[in-house]
Image: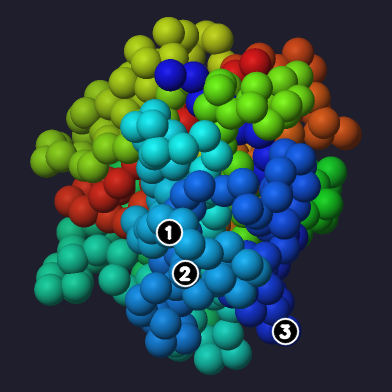
Amino acid sequence: MDIYVVGVGMTPFGKFREKTIKDMTSEAVTAALADAGLASKDIEGAFFSNAVQGHMEGQHMIRGEIALRSMGIQGIPVVNVENACASASTGFKLAVDFLKAGNGDICLAVGTEKMFSDDRKRMFAAFDSGWDVAAGDEVAEQLMRLGDGIQEPEGSKSANPYSVFMDVYAGFARLHMKTFGTKMEHFAAVSSKNHGHSVHNPLAQYRNPMSLEEVMNAPPITYPLTLPMCAPISDGSAAAILCTAEGLKRYGLDENRAIKVKAAVLRSGTDHPAQDYQKHITHLAAKQAYELAGIGPQDISLAEVHDATAVGEVIQSENLGLFNFGDGGPAALRGDTTIGGKVPINTSGGLESKGHPVGATGIGQIFELVTQLRNEAGARQVEGATNAIAENGGGLHGIEEAAACITILGR
């Protein structure tokens, strides 16, 4: 059964003290419905994604029912989805499955997160359950040890509080440096490129270009990461309306703007050596997605990948088969991943610059890909885009993400 994205909506990503979860959910869903030419009464099922509202506000249960009822969506199945940073893409995949199972013709997938707080300790603690809390210190130490052998230069660690996940990403970065000879400037090239892309995204949290030198010389977080290489704390919401082929006809929707879901894959991690990149969760999920879509990496026009740090983009561009293992960093430095290059990546600005409200991030990626495939991205448009891929990872278990979602969309 063919499934299509017929509407997308997204709030700006940023820090919004005055906006509630309900406010942002309503804004994104209303925009998606208007984009599709549908009304809330047409929705036959909804998947609401959120990761930290329980920690931040104490709303541990029925988050979706509460957020959606406030805007008049009620009486339908509402499923709450939590899968760490992969929550929204997981909800999107479940919406695809809902329609393929014959439960209806119109389904909503929405992710909303309110993360920013003046209580910085509480804010950063929101990430503490992204791994096995029963062995948190042990897990953190194991992951950070991946980078043993790469010397951390003096003065390259921030004295200010930051998420422990940045130390973990630094461990991944140093392992990549040891294994493939990747340099700090390669990661800086990714960050500079993404900040340049976000200049043309009116919904991005940051819209200031940064040169490679500015990224390299920015305040350090933990080697080899500097501040612009790391995703900020963000609030925001993103929504997608999915539809069956029968629904397209029944509701008289614009088939020219309907984007086909060619593959939606969700996978959990496995036990394997950290250096065995061929068995990485994302690489295996991507191979599965390409097979379902009937295409290969060579057919991809652009990608949105999970760059919670610039390191993530390098690793994931290789896992998706867009570049050979070890060539993701040099490719970024060559300009291959810039708009106009071989395979533009994170045309939205990525998590580093667009923002990273974790429960909304995956559908934020879908928003960008749909916009590109419709040829509606303006100054950041990838010319002739026909197939696009999104990679969204969540949590950590063992030596990789606990969950990974791969979505392939096409004309």
Give the crowd class for mark 1: few <14, some 14-19, many >=20 residues within 10 Å: many
Image quadrant in which the N terminus is located:
top left
Is 410 located above or below residue 238 in the figure?
above
Q: Quadrant of residue 135?
A: bottom left
Q: Which residue is mark 1?
A: 78
Q: CA distance from mark 1 to mark 2?
A: 6 Å
Q: Secondary structure at mark 1?
A: strand
Q: Which residue is mark 2?
A: 65
Instruction: Please state the horizontal and vertical placement of residue 70, each as a whole percent of the image.
Output: 61, 74
Q: Secondary structure at mark 3?
A: loop
Q: Which residue is mark 3?
A: 18
Name the amino acid, label 1: Val
Q: Quadrant of residue 285?
A: top left
Asked if labels 2 and 1 touch by Cβ distance under 8 angstroms, the answer is yes
Give the crowd class for mark 3: few <14, some 14-19, many >=20 residues within 10 Å: few
Mark 3 vs mark 2: which is more N-terminal?
3
